[in-house]
Image (spheres, rainbow, N blue to C red):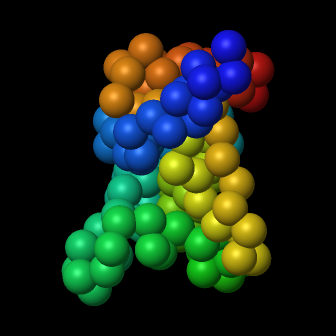
Amino acid sequence: MLRETVFYARRPRRGVKWYAHTACSLMLAIALNPAWVPLALIGSTLPDAVERILGAKHRSMHELMLWLPLLPLLATGYGGLALGAIHHVLLDALTAHGVTVAGRRIRGPFSTSRPLDNLAAILLHLPILLLL
């Protein structure tokens, strides 16, 4: 039983798929401020895009503290960009690879090599959309 737990923790280390990031940010933007939708869609893939542009290793820019300075944008017309980018990092914290927060690794149970885990991430956002 212990070996199964260890094997489970060593699943493929991939991030949430782009479609899940986009769908989740879309639902949040619709619920919070529909005018944010276009920028939320851009922000939903921004952390990965920045890594590619800079030629950085994947998840090297997924330190939550790098993205928190975007929080003041939530009070502006650029709130969707901040929402999408910060939510991207928070959603990746739910994966087996996780993200860092102030240098500490935060990990979750999801493995994005399984489509059902991506679907579960999306479905977790439905109550937010329906309640707000």
Q: Is residue 123 left or right of residue 74?
A: left
- Asked if residue 16 is positioned above or below residue 109 in the image, the reply reads below
Task: Judge whether 26 appears above or below 100 on screen.
Answer: above
> In the depicted view, which residue is nearer to us: 62 or 10?
10
Image-quadrant location for residue 94: top right
**Which quadrant is the N terminus positioned in?**
top right
Image quarter of residue 132 = top right
**Number of numbered callouts drawn:** 0
Residue sitting at 40 percent across and 32 percent down?
112
Q: Position of residue 58 (x, y in %)?
A: 35, 66
Relative side of 42 to 101, left or right: left
The quadrant holding residue 43 is: bottom left
**Above or below for 94 versus 65:** above
Q: Does the image show residue 87?
A: no
Q: Position of residue 62 (x, y in %)?
A: 52, 68
Q: Position of residue 121 (x, y in %)?
A: 54, 27
Viewed as shown, does residue 78 lie left or right of 127?
Answer: left
- Can residue 59 be seen here? yes
Residue located at (68% from left, 61% from top): 105
Residue displayed at 38% across by 39% down: 12
